[in-house]
Amino acid sequence: MRDSIQIRPAQPGDAEVAAVLLASAYTHTPVTYPLREEHENGWIKRLQDFFRQDGNRFSYQNIQIAEQGTEVIGLILSFGGRDEARLNAAAGSWLKREAKDDEWYVDALAVLKNWGRKGIGTRLLHTAEQQARQHHYPKIALNVAQGNKQALDLYTQLHYVITQQTFLYQRPHVRMVKTLENGEQRNDGNVSEDGKAAWT
């Protein structure tokens, strides 16, 4: 089954499920799709709109999708730190600067609840690390909500190191960084084969 899961660049047509996954990542709440109507909200609609547009932080252009058959089951949103100010400005002044210029930044990682613990989060992270190398970034970074043990465990297994504690949008987070210099780190597929889904 693991081999039937494909990772591909997002397309504007993925907006509905992608917005639900992004909201899941930002609220640290596992979700299934489709959402029941009472859970639909203005934030998800805004994320759909941003996702369909070019050149902003939440754009499909910054997202890799995991799918099984034709079903979207997870995503990762990442971008180069040097681009963050421009991407934020296109989405609104409420966004904070989270990445450094020499880092590829993972802004959101989410897998649908019924697809958790199958290695999908790990595969999506490896895809982001490949993108970082392709764009010549020596490091990849992310912020994790404090207390999100599942995500912290996954990132620690994949050699991300806590560098500081911080507050983002009134919530305590830990910043984690992985150095990618000198080619491949041990991404031999033996890490976290239980594949914990993660929400940053």
Image (tube, helix red, strand yellow):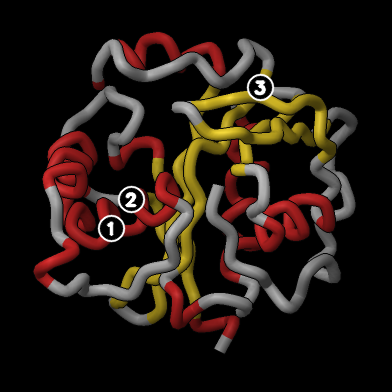
Q: Is residue 135 left or right of residue 115?
A: right
Residues tagged 2 and 1 counted as in contact (Cβ below 8 A): yes
Residue 196 drawn above or below residue 8: below
Residue 20 relative to residue 137: left or right: left
SS at mark 3 in the image: strand
Quarter of the image with the N terminus in it = bottom right
Point 29% across, 24% down: residue: 56
**Quarter of the rendering containing residue 63:** top left
Q: Quadrant of residue 123?
A: bottom right
Q: Which residue is mark 3?
A: 103
**Residue visible at 47% across and 70% down?**
6
Rounded to the nearest angstrom, the CA distance separating label 2 from label 3 is 24 Å
Under mark 3, the amino acid is Glu
Pick the front one: 193 or 114: 114
Numbered disc total: 3
Labels 2 & 3 near each other (Cβ < 8 A) = no
Q: Residue furthest bottom?
A: 1
Relative image position of residue 190 (x, y in whole percent):
85, 70
Inspect the image, locate mark 2, and give the three-letter code of the amino acid beneath it: Ala
Q: Residue at x 20, y 34 (%)?
A: 50
Is residue 133 visible in the rendered image? The answer is no
Query: Tag on residue 40?
Result: none
Q: Which amino acid is tagged 1?
A: Val
| Mark 1 or mark 3, whichever is nearer to me | 1
The residue identified by callout 1 is 20
| Residue, disc 2 | 23
Q: What distance separates the C-alpha of mark 2 from that of mark 1?
A: 5 Å
Q: Position of residue 37 (x, y in %)?
A: 10, 69
Element marked by disc 2: helix
Few, some or many residues within 10 Å of mark 3 (<14, 14–19, 20+) = many
Sequence order check, earlier mark of 2 and 3? 2
